[in-house]
Image: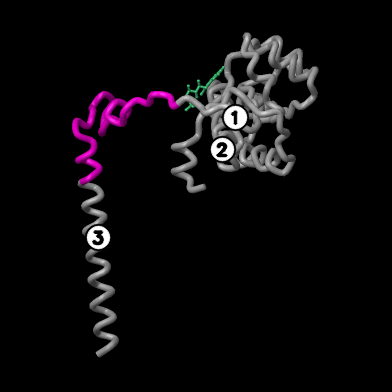
Amino acid sequence: MQTQECIKTRRSIRKFLPVPVEFEKLGRILDAGRLAPSAGNVQNWKFIVVTDDAKKRAVVDACVEQFWIETAPVLVVVCGDPVKVERLYGDKGAFYTIQNCAAAIENMLLTAHDMSIGSCWVGAFDDVKLRAALAIPDNVVPQAVLPIGYAEEKPIEPSHLTIENVVYLERYGNRVRDIASFMDEYSVHVQKAVAKLKGFVARAIERIKK
Ligand SMILES: Cc1cc2nc3c(=O)[nH]c(=O)nc-3n(C[C@H](O)[C@H](O)[C@H](O)COP(=O)(O)O)c2cc1C
């Protein structure tokens, strides 16, 4: 799947078929998390793979009544260890740990979707219960639960803010009134440059022929 198509068509999946996820595909998802960017390249994430039914139930129990999670054959719990990054960046350590894990999570969601596997970013959980369920040490912070499996639902298309609502030009709050024409103008520049290049190549070919 092309990157743009993958980004545009990914949706949160909250109902899964009772079909196991191939080990090789799960490996690819975890590897995509491993390859995410991180502050200072500290890679201070850990991914706990949960397949055991009793352990899964304990994780679901931590996820504040989101019982649908149990329908996923695999759960990946993403944890961040802020110690090393705090040593490097002081107060920014916790902030970077959240961002590093978020980058890994999005890489995993997109890679799953690329292989037609569904997932969902679950951030609503009871920290204490989740730590107890998976023996997560005190210095490590659970960041997300990712239920992973083949979808048994047609996901809801969420509403998205328009680009005018989220893009400012040059300073905070400065909306681009007609962003379509702003982007169109840009594409006109690109088209002109391509036409110029084509003309240059055509003339060069003519000269060689002569
Ligand atoms: C930080 C974060 C926490 C989230 N927590 C939950 C959650 O606990 N349960 C859930 O069902 N979805 C959760 N979501 C998924 C969002 O509801 C979902 O991404 C959003 O509605 C947009 O839908 P889409 O993912 O299909 O584009 C979370 C997403 C993010 C980024």
Instruction: List the residue tagged with mark 3.
Output: 193
What amino acid is labelled 1 in the image? Ser
What main secondary structure does the magenta stretch of the protein show?
A: loop
Q: Secondary structure at mark 2?
A: helix
Label 1 to label 3: alpha-carbon separation: 42 Å
Q: Secondary structure at mark 1?
A: strand
Is there CB contact under 8 Å for labels 3 and 2?
A: no
Identify which residue, 20 or 80, lies in the foreground: 20
* Colour mapping: one colour
Q: Secondary structure at mark 3?
A: helix
Q: Which mark is residue 119?
A: 1
Q: Name the N-terminal-most of marks 3 and 2.
A: 2
Is there CB contact under 8 Å for labels 2 and 1?
A: yes
> 73 left or right of 199?
right
Front disc: 3 or 2: 2
Label 2 to label 1: alpha-carbon separation: 8 Å
Instruction: Kindly identify the residue that appears in the image at 54 percent across and 21 percent down.
Output: 91
The picture quadrant where one finds residue 113 is: top right
Regarding residue 198, the answer to whether it shows in the image is yes
Instruction: List the residue tagged with mark 2.
Output: 113
Magenta region: which residues?
157-184
The picture quadrant where one finds residue 144 is: top right
Query: In the image, residue 72 lies at what x, y percent?
Result: 68, 25
